[in-house]
Image (cartoon, rainbow, N blue to C red):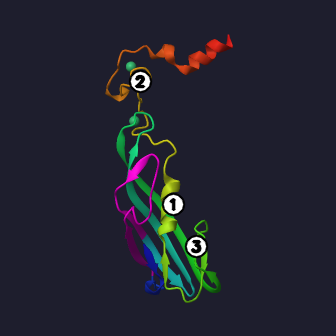
Amino acid sequence: MKLRLGEIEEKPGRVTLKGEPEDLELEWKDGCFRSPVCLELKVFRRGDRFLAQGEITTSVDARCSRCLREFPLPVRTQFKLTIELTPKGNNGDNVEEDYILLSPQSEVLDLRERVRQLILLSLPVKPLCHPNCRGLCPICGKDLNEGECGCRREEYDPRWEKLKSLR
Ligand SMILES: [Zn+2]
Ligand SMILES: [Zn+2]
């Protein structure tokens, strides 16, 4: 995922960069990355400044935090970066900034780490296969999305236990 600054012109253009999840070292405790990562950018330059703006898309096989089923979770997140070539510039390692300074000789900028972090930031804390996922029965473990199991779960609701202890 290398942005070639020499190929960016004053006239706005489009650049598409692709990367494999292994190259980006994408790892997530709640899922597995198996699809390529695509970065589609609009780019242009004004003198020593370059602007790249667009979208990162991929998909992750996530595990639902309620029912534990695997489901495809689409990932779509914004990308925006301004690059300035200046003698004060360094190597562009500071991925927290969306305005970076590079040395005037810079020709290529590797976007892997930046893209990796933006993807990880966009992931949900508790992935859900569906907003109304009913989860697993805490007593028998049945997936309640597939139907009722007949357990009397009200008696086991931990919130009731708390209420009882208050009495
Ligand atoms: Zn679920
Ligand atoms: Zn049950």
Residue 137, disc: 2
Task: Give the amino acid type for the residue marked by disc 2 in the picture.
Answer: Cys
Name the spot of residue 156 as percent of width and height, x first: 50, 16
Q: Nearer the viewer, mark 3 or mark 1?
A: 3
Q: Quadrant of ligand 2?
A: top left
Name the spot of residue 29 as percent of width and height, x first: 47, 48
Residue 42 versus residue 160 in the image, above or below: below
Q: Tag 1's secondary structure?
A: helix
Q: Tag 3's secondary structure?
A: loop
User: Measuring 40% from the left and 76% from the top, which residue is drawn there?
Assistant: 14
- Circles 2, 3 touching at the beta carbon (< 8 Å): no
Q: Earlier in the sequence, mark 3 or mark 1?
A: 3
Image quarter (top left, top right, bottom left or bottom right) of the C terminus: top right
Distance Cα–Cα, label 2 vs label 1: 35 Å
Residue 118, disc: 1
How many labels, in total?
3
Quick one: label 2, few (<14), some, or many (20+) residues within 10 Å?
Answer: some
Q: Which residue is mark 3?
A: 93
- Of 11 and 157, the residue lying toward us: 157
Task: Give the amino acid type for the residue marked by disc 1 in the picture.
Answer: Leu
Q: Provide the residue span drawn in magenta.
A: 12-40
